[in-house]
């Protein structure tokens, strides 16, 4: 379900593939991703940083506990030996949520793979090794800007009398 919700690809194709059918069109013209595709950028550098962290510290890259971004963001977790990694603190310009989104995109694009059922762990795939060596490029979604919600009281004239 998470894969469907976070996918940047055609949702119709995603569903049909899930149920064993094939959809060969590039654009279905009826889902949000086809009608309003997310803006993408060359995410090779951040992708390589994520893959390097997975490679250097594979034992903590479990998706279930969402500790993935802590490997290269400043974190308070004393059990996490990430501070010794060369990539430690190189992802501080991005939020944990954005890093998780990119990690999930790398999984969907087969640069990373999940291993295990009950406690899945993220590992590098063969395609990921190619990206890590600089022999490939990856496109990732542009970070969404978090709009701050400012609550303003209603104007007196907007209130409906009871």
Image (cartoon, rainbow, N blue to C red):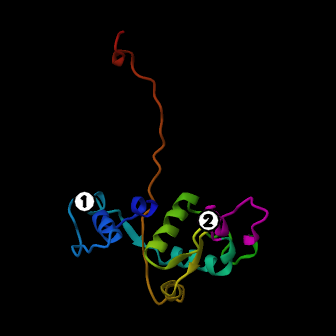
* Nearer-the-camera pick, 14 or 48: 14
Q: Is residue 144 left or right of residue 26?
A: right
Near mark 2 (Cα within 10 A), the count class, few <14, some 14-19 or many ≥20, is many
75 falls in the magenta region: yes
Q: Quadrant of residue 90?
A: bottom right
On the image, the x and y values in percent for residue 121 come to 61, 72
Q: Quadrant of the N terminus?
A: bottom left
Which residues, given as a range, are shown in magenta? 61-82
The one of 88 and 18 positioned closer to us in this rendering: 18
x and y percentages locating residue 105 in the rendered image: 46, 69
Q: Residue at x 54, y 64 (%)?
A: 99
Quarter holding residue 158:
top left
Q: Which mark is residue 126?
A: none
Whether residues under marks 2 and 1 lie with C-beta atoms below 8 angstroms apart, the answer is: no
Q: CA distance from mark 2 to mark 1?
A: 31 Å
Q: Is the magenta region chiefly helix, strand or loop?
A: loop
For image coordinates 57% across by 74% down, the residue present is: 50
Residue 67 relative to residue 37: left or right: right
Q: Nearer the viewer, residue 75 or 60?
A: 60
Q: Is residue 129 left or right of residue 32?
A: right
Q: Is residue 1 left or right of residue 70?
A: left
In-front residue for pair 29/76: 29
**Residue holding disc 1:** 35
Q: Quadrant of the C terminus?
A: top left
Q: Please tell me how crowded label 1 is: few (under 14), some (14-19), or many (20+) other residues with Cα within 10 Å.
A: few
Q: Residue at x 74, y 58 (%)?
A: 76
- Find disc 2 in the rendering and name its residue: 69
Sequence order check: which comes first, mark 2 or mark 1? 1
Q: Secondary structure at mark 1?
A: helix
The answer to if 117 sits in the magenta stretch is: no
Query: Which image quadrant is residue 142 in?
Result: bottom left
């Amino acid at each position: 379900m998470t894969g469907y919700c976070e996918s940047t690809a055609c949702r119709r194709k995603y569903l049909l593939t899930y149920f064993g059918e094939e959809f060969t069109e590039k654009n279905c013209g009826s889902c949000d991703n086809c009608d309003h595709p997310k803006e993408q950028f060359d995410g090779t550098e951040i992708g390589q940083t994520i893959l390097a962290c997975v490679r250097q510290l594979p034992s903590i890259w479990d998706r279930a506990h969402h500790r993935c971004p802590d490997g290269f963001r400043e974190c308070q977790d004393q059990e996490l030996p990430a501070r010794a990694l060369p990539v430690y603190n190189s992802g501080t310009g991005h939020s944990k949520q954005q890093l998780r989104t990119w990690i999930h995109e790398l999984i969907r694009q087969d640069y990373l793979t999940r291993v295990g059922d009950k406690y899945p762990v993220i590992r590098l795939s063969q395609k990921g090794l190619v990206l890590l060596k600089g022999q490939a490029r990856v496109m990732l979604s542009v970070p969404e800007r978090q709009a701050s919600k400012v609550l303003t009281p209603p104007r007196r004239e907007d209130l409906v009398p009871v």
